[in-house]
Amino acid sequence: MKHLLFTLILSLFVANSQAAVQPTGEYIQPDNLFPKVMFVTSLGDITVELDRMKAAITVNNFLSYVAAKRYEDTIFHRLEHNFVLQGGGYTTKMESIKAFPTIVNESGNGIKNDQYTISMARQYTPHSATSQFFFNLADNDSLNPGRNWGYTVFGNIVAGEDVLEKLEGIETDISPELGWPSFPTKKIVLIKVQILAE
């Protein structure tokens, strides 16, 4: 009897632990096809309208990270002028954020990587996106799908374009911690991402 009770308690503990780390984005404003979020950054606020109609998997994945507060106190670690601003991967202490499982690439949804859109970053393989995202700072046709997979666009900026314009004066260099080029010499911090009321 004691063994059965112990097994039951252990099963409940494991189930609760797994539930705590499972993505929950689909439960956030589930009937809202275009939820809005605000990126509160060290340069100012950026409001983004997400597109569940054309990128439901990607939007729900992104909202899962927001709900888990994994984007809080992270940095934008890649800035390529007239191309992209990338973040969602590293904390201000240069530690990798804890990622959920990879998601399916939805780059064929018809939305282009145009200026002031937000897209998922990924590895070379198409279905490898997890937490990292980027803002398109120009119309980036090379990131759209063609003969090969593209990069999934899942929303667009509806307020705060001026914040991205401030980036033009920030220089980049090789990161001493990561060894990557295109690293902003002035730290650009993502303080938090806030889900806005419907």
Image: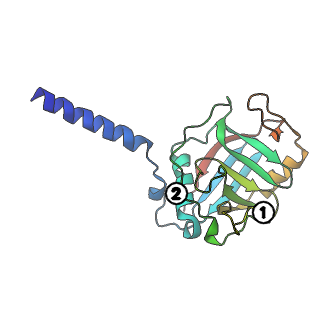
Measured along the vertical axis of the image, is residue 165 above or below residue 68?
below
Marks 1 and 2, how far apart at CA: 25 Å
Three-letter amino acid code of the residue under disc 2: Asn
Give residue 6's quadrant in the image.
top left
Q: Earlier in the sequence, mark 1 or mark 2?
A: 2
Give residue 11's quadrant in the image.
top left
Residue visible at 44% across and 42% down in the picture: 21
Between 89 and 65, which is closer to the camera in this rendering? 89
Residue visible at 84% across and 47% down in the picture: 167
Task: Give residue 96's position: percent from left, percent from top.
Answer: 62, 35
Horizontal relation, residue 85 to residue 16: left or right: right
Q: Pointer 2: what residue?
A: 60
Task: Give residue 86's position: percent from left, percent from top.
Answer: 73, 47
Q: Pointer 1: what residue?
A: 142
Q: Residues within 10 Å of mark 2 (few under 14, many from 20)?
A: many
**Closer mark to the observer between disc 1 and disc 2:** 1
Residue visible at 82% across and 39% down in the picture: 181
Residue 149 seen in render: yes
Measured along the vertical axis of the image, is residue 133 above or below residue 106?
above
Three-letter amino acid code of the residue under disc 1: Ser
Task: Give residue 131's position: percent from left, percent from top.
Answer: 60, 47
Residue visible at 85% across and 53% down in the picture: 165
Furthest-front residue in this view: 147
